[in-house]
Image (cartoon, grey):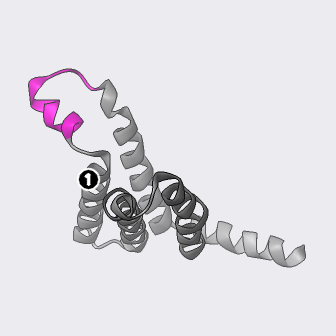
């Protein structure tokens, strides 16, 4: 139990670094903005924002955050790690919707994805 507390204390120290807080804050602001995009005014020049898939907006936003932080000479490791994880997750969804839909029946596909592929992906990420 003491080892677990020491590990948690090490993570809290890591999370208090200014560069980590800045990157996590930027990603949190991006996620909040994407969640709120349905509440945008119905202006014609914002129509493309609603029509663009959320996954594409998320990756573009993370790329923009990484570009801005990099241009300012700040660290971008967590932002790029988040972008790679999101890209891999979207690849897993693409595998399910494009390849497995043609090769497996729906029940077998659901079992494979929900009990093997997604949990394995999350274990690898963690």
Closer-to-camera residue (25/43): 43
Which residue is found at the position 23% from the left and 66% from the top? Answer: 67
Judge whether 71 appears above or below 114 on screen.
below
Q: In which quarter of the image is the N terminus?
A: bottom right
- Lateral position of residue 67 relative to residue 39, left or right: left
Which residue is found at the position 40% from the left and 46% from the top? Answer: 31
> Does the magenta portion include 62?
no
Which residue is found at the position 43% from the left and 60% from the top? Answer: 22
Q: Which residue lies furthest to the left in this view?
A: 45
| Quadrant of the rendered image containing residue 12 | bottom right
- Residue 123 image offset from top left, x and y in percent: 60, 72
Query: Which residue has dot 1 on it?
Result: 56
Circle 1 SS class: helix
Judge whether 103 appears above or below 3 on screen.
above
- Residue 34 image offset from top left, x and y in percent: 35, 41
> Does the magenta portion include 44?
yes
Closer-to-camera residue (52/11): 52
- Lateral position of residue 13 relative to residue 62, left or right: right
The total of numbered circles placed on residues is: 1
- Residue 28 image offset from top left, x and y in percent: 44, 50
Closer-to-camera residue (83/23): 83
Closer-to-camera residue (106/47): 106
- Residue 126 image offset from top left, x and y in percent: 59, 72
Magenta stretch, overall SS: helix
At label 1, counting other C-alpha atoms closer than 10 Å, the crowd grade (few under 14, some 14-19, many 20 or more) is: few
Which residue is found at the position 31% from the left and 46% from the top? Answer: 54
Segment colored magenta: 40-51
- Lateral position of residue 88 relative to residue 4, left or right: left
């Amino acid at each position: 139990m003491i080892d677990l507390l020491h590990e948690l204390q090490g993570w809290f120290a890591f999370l208090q670094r200014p560069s980590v807080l800045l990157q996590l804050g930027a990603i949190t602001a991006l996620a909040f903005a994407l969640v709120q995009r349905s509440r945008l005014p119905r202006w014609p020049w914002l129509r493309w924002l609603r029509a663009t898939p959320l996954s594409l907006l998320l990756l573009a936003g993370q790329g923009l955050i990484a570009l801005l932080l990099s241009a300012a000479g700040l660290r971008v490791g967590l932002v790029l790690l988040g972008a790679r994880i999101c890209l891999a997750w979207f690849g897993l969804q693409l595998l399910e919707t494009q390849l497995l839909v043609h090769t497996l029946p729906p029940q077998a596909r659901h079992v494979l994805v929900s009990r093997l592929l997604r949990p394995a992906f999350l274990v690898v990420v963690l």
